[in-house]
Image (cartoon, helix red, strand yellow):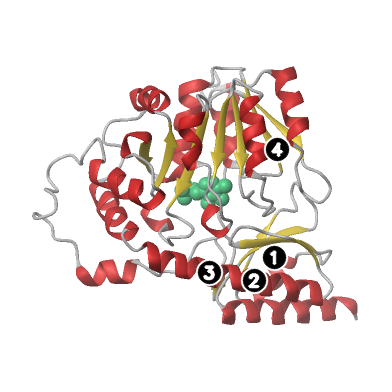
Amino acid sequence: MELVKESIRNLKEYVPNNLDYKIKLDANEGKNILFKDIYKEGIKFGEDFNINFYPDNETTLLREEIGKYINVNSANIIAGNGSSEMIELIIKTFVDKDEVILSFTPTFSMYSIFSKIYSTKFIGLKSNKDFSVNIELLINKAKEVNPKVIILCNPNNPTGYLIDKDHIKTLLENTDSIVVVDEAYIEFAGDSMVNEIGNYKNLIVLRTLSKALGLAAVRLGYMVSNEKIINIINKVRSPYNLNALTQYVGITALKNKDKIMCYVEEVKKERESLYSKLKEIGIEVFKSYGNFVFFKCEIINLKYRLAEYGILIRDFSEDLKGYFRVTVGSEYENREFIKCLKEIKENAKS
Ligand SMILES: *Cc1c(COP(=O)(O)O)cnc(C)c1O
């Protein structure tokens, strides 16, 4: 008897890199700009919370702090263990077996992984050759396949492409499906959709502290939507889903908006410089609005060649042969990456 349910028998799991490294540019993690301070100040156990009691199920103080950070009422927010938990919650709430989730490809692999786990049908509409996307095509496809949920990653991981806010509004005006906008990297791009949640009955925006706030280890993400949707999803959310330590770190970290925005500006500057340098050494590179850059390179085994220098990047060759994503690092890290890539490229020629 096969005990494992059919939908996950052929599931390809999410596999993080486990190579040794000196410079880690494979997972779009931010720099540790905040936690050092939080650590120095210390967590006042007992004063701030009782560790023997279950954490605040409503994550009240944290949602208030998130609300201030994005200028939204805390009643419009649910927090959890990364936006990954939020994606799962949305699928659990809205999509039944065999119903459709529509998105573009290439995009964040967790959408199709969760989609499989819950026996739903993931349809990825192909991006254009330059990885831009066509919203009109998506609207027409939605009319044809009737998705329960449409997911847009904006800016898109791994390509860096940013969909114009007006195009997202056009989509919202032309579909009754739940439209999820995953804004994991929006701090590096600009205009968020969070202030639009009151204008639509079907908009959910996902955000995370893993990227611009550099708190990937803490596991903290959130969703923003109208109260009707928030109340429905809260019924599905597991009680005490977010532990007290993470709530505490989140509250403290979000008070540092100036510091965060300062870091974001640094990354944007480095991103443009990395883009130009890749272009200069003859690499096909795509304009990015995230904290990473997507590029094409024919060198065989580039990921492993760079790993020999202690540099990690992300390889997408399994689905997109010859395409890679590199996280924007510090000035030094980017310089090292370019130097090694150039060397590998020149050796490959001779
Ligand atoms: C990194 C990333 C996330 C964040 O996931 P967390 O679970 O919050 O760490 C979400 N969506 C996309 C597209 C990402 O790249």
- The residue indicated by pointer 1 is 303
User: Of marks 3 and 2, which one's residue comes earlier in the chain?
Assistant: 3
Of the residues under marks 1 and 3, which one precedes in the sequence?
Answer: 3
At mark 2, the secondary structure is helix
Position of residue 212 measured from the top left corner of the image (x, y, whole percent): 47, 60
Residue at left offset 77%, top offset 82%: 343
Q: Which residue is mark 2?
A: 307
Query: Is the residue marked by circle 2 packed among few (<14), some (14-19), or many (20+) residues within 10 Å?
Result: some
User: Is the residue under label 2 in contact with that under label 1 (CB below 8 Å)?
Assistant: yes
Question: Is the N terminus in the top left, top right, bottom left or bottom right quadrant?
Answer: top right
Q: Quadrant of residue 73?
A: top left
Structural distance between the alpha carbons of marks 3 and 2: 28 Å
Q: What is the CA distance from the residue labelled 2 to the residue labelled 4?
A: 30 Å
Residue 265 numbered mark, or none: 3
Asked if the residue at tag 2 contacts the one at tag 3, i.e. Cβ–Cβ closer than 8 Å, the answer is: no
Q: Nearer the viewer, mark 3 or mark 2?
A: 3
| Disc number lying in front (4 or 1) | 4
Q: Locate the C terminus by quadrant.
A: bottom right
Closer to the N terminus: mark 4 or mark 1?
4
